[in-house]
Image (cartoon, rainbow, N blue to C red):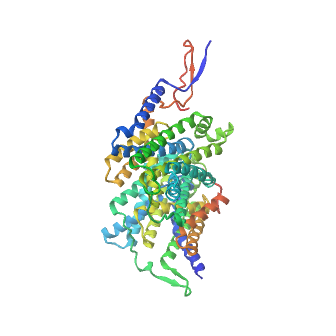
Amino acid sequence: MVWVSAVVQGILLGGLYALFATGLSLAFGVLRFVNLAHGDLAILAAYLTLSTSSTLEVSAWVSMVLVVAVMAAVGYIAQRGIFNFTIGPDPLPAILVTFGIGVVIQNALLNHYTATDKRIKIGSIVTKSIKVTDRLSVGWFPLLTLVVAVVILGGLQLFISRTRTGRAFRATSDDPKTAQLMGINDRHLYAVAMAIAFGTVGLAGVFLGARTTFAPSSGPNELLFGFEAVVIGGLGSIWGTLVGGVVLGVAQTVGNQWSIGFDLLAGHLVFLTVLAFRPNGIFGTGVRT
Amino acid sequence: MTAFRVVRASRFSIVATAVSVAAVVVLALGPSWASRGTKLSLIQIFYYLSLAQMWNLLAGYAGLVSVGQQGFVGVAAYAVFVLAERNGIDPFLAMALAGLLTAALSAPVALFAFRLKGGYFAIGTWVIAEVFRLITLRIKPLGAGKVQSLTVRNTFAGYSIERRQDLVYWAALALAVGATLIVVLVLRSRQGLALRSIRDDEGGARGLGVQVTRTRLVVWVIAAGWVGMTGALIHINSATITNRDAFDVLSWTALVVFIVIIGGVGSTAGPIIGVAIFWFVTERFKDSDTGRFMILGALAAVMAVVAPRGIDGLIQRVRSFELFPIRRRLVVDDSAVPTPDLTSGHP
C-alpha cells in the first residue's frame, strides 16, 4: 500500500512539474527559445505573492491572480524588449541572456528577502485531504494543482489547435520566414507566447510556494524538473509535457519510498534513461534545433 | 611573377606573444615579490582564467554551451579528498589524477548530453552535474554531508606553510598559462580548423568530411580534464570541501560564463579581458557577494544582446588585432599586384 500511495502522490506532484514545464515547452515549441531563468521566475512570483498579500492585505488567492497577470505582462515586455533581439540561428545569446537574468533574480531575491525559507499561506486547503483508505489519502491542494495543470495544458492545446493565434503559432514554429511573408507579426506572436510562458510559470511558482517552503536559491531545481518533464514527454508535445511531469513526479516519490533522500537522484536517473533510449521522449515528434 | 605565402604571425601578435611571455616570467617570480594578499588574489585570477579559457573553448569554438562545469569541479574536489587526505598521495599528484578522472568521466557524460542541442544541452549538463553532486552525497565514505578538510597532518604532510603556498601559486599559474596554450594550440591544429568550420556552418563542415561529433568530443574531454585539475587546485588552495560549494553552479559556471561573455566569446583574448573586469568588480564588491553576482550577471546579459562578442569584439571593430598567431592569412609578395584585403573578417 505504501507503494500505491507513493505512486498516487507522484502523479499529483507530476501536476506541479507539468505546470513548470508548460512555459518551457511552449517557448521551445514556438520560438525554439530556452529560458534558463525559468525556475528563478517561478520563485520570483512566489515572493511577489507573499509581498502583495502583506502590502495590500489581501488573501494569497487574490495576490496570485495579480502576480500571474503581472508576470504575463513582464513576459510580453521582456520578449519584445530583450529576447527578440537574441533570436537567430545561434542559440548562444538567448542562453546567456536568460542565464544572466536568472543569476540576477536569484541574488536580488537573496538581497531583499534573505536566505530564510518562506511559505505562502493559502488557507486550510493545504492541510485537508480526502481519505481513500486507511493508508491512502489524497491532499486537496496537490489534487487542485494537478487539475489546474490539466486545465491549463488542455486550454493551451485547444488554443493552439482552434484559434487564429494558435494557427499562427504552429505556422511560425514550422517555418518562421514563410509565416512572416503571409503577414504574421512574429514579434508580437513571440511576445504572446512568452507572456503565456511567464504567466504559467508564475502560477507554478505560487503553487510550489504554497505546497512547500522555498528560498531564493530554489529556482534552478525547478528549472531542471520542468526541463526534464519536457524532454521525457517529448519536445513539441503538449500532452507529452503532462505525461513527462507525471513520470518525473512518480520517479521521485517512488525513489524516496525506496530510500529516503533518493527522490531527486531517482528523477534525474529516469530522465537520463529516457534520454538514452528514447532521445525524442515518449511522445516526441523528433523536433530538433 | 607573384609569390604567395600563408602566414599566421603579425607584427602585433609577435609583440603580444613576447609581452605575454615576459608577463608570465614576472608572475612566475611572484613568490619573491608579491605580498600574501596579492598572491591570494592572483591565485583566484589564475584559476578563473583557466576555467574561462576552457569554457571559451567549449562554447566559443565547439558550440558546446555547458552549464555543468561545476560537476567536474566537485568530482575533482572529492577525488583530491580521497587520494590525498585519505590515502596519503601527494596533493599535486592527486590534482593531476583528479584531472584524469574527470576527463575519463566526461566521455560517458557526452553520450547523454550530446543528444541535446543548444539550450537543452546547457540544461542537460546542469542535470548531470546535479547527478554527480547527489551521488557524492550518497557515497557514505566521502562524508559529503559534512564539511571536510584537507589537513596539514595528512594531505599537506611534509610541506611547510610557505612551500605549500608557493606551490599552489605556481600550480594555479601553470593551469592558467596551460589553459591558454591549449586553446591556442588546439586552434592552430587541424582540429581547430575543423572546430571553426563547424562553428561557422555545421552542415557545410560535415559535407567537407569534418567529423563533427568526434571533434567536439575531443574538445569536451580536454576541457573536462583541465577543469577537473583546476577544481582540484581550487580545493587544495581552500583546504575545505563542502558539497554545496564544491558543486556550486554560481561560482564555477556562472561567474566563468560571465567572464567569457563580458571579455569576448570565441576569442583567445576575451577570457583575459574578462578576468581583468571580474577582478575589478570583485575588488569593488568585497563585502557583497550578491552585489558582485548582480553586476556581472546584468553586464553579461546586456553584452549578450548588444555586443555578442564582448569587449574584445568592440575593440576589434575599431582595430582588428589578434593576440596570438592563430588565423592564417595569405600574403602576396609582389608589390606590383594589388593586394586583396584578406585579413579582415572572420576566418
Q: For the image shown, how many numbered marks are present on the structure?
A: 0
Q: Residue furthest front?
A: B158
Q: Residue furthest bottom?
A: A134
- From the top left corner, tell me how far across and down residue A165 is, in percent: 54, 57
A145 lies above or below A36: below
- From the top left corner, tell me how far across and down residue A88 is, in percent: 53, 45
From the image, which quarter does the N terminus of chain B lie in? top right
- From the top left corner, tell me how far across and down residue A109 is, in percent: 37, 60
- Residue A157 left/right relative to A72: right
**Considering depth in this image, is A20 or A166 the residue closer to the camera?**
A20
A83 lies above or below B13: below
From the image, which quarter does the C terminus of chain B lie in? top right
Looking at the image, can residue B177 be seen?
Answer: yes
**Considering depth in this image, is B258 or B33 the residue closer to the camera?**
B33
Q: Residue at x 55, y 16 (%)?
A: B338
**Considering depth in this image, is A218 or B219 the residue closer to the camera?**
B219
Looking at the image, can residue B259 be seen?
Answer: no
A154 lies above or below B28: below
Q: Residue at x 53, y 23 (%)?
A: B341
Location of residue A7 (image quadrant): bottom right
- From the top left corner, tell me how far across and down residue A154 is, in percent: 56, 67
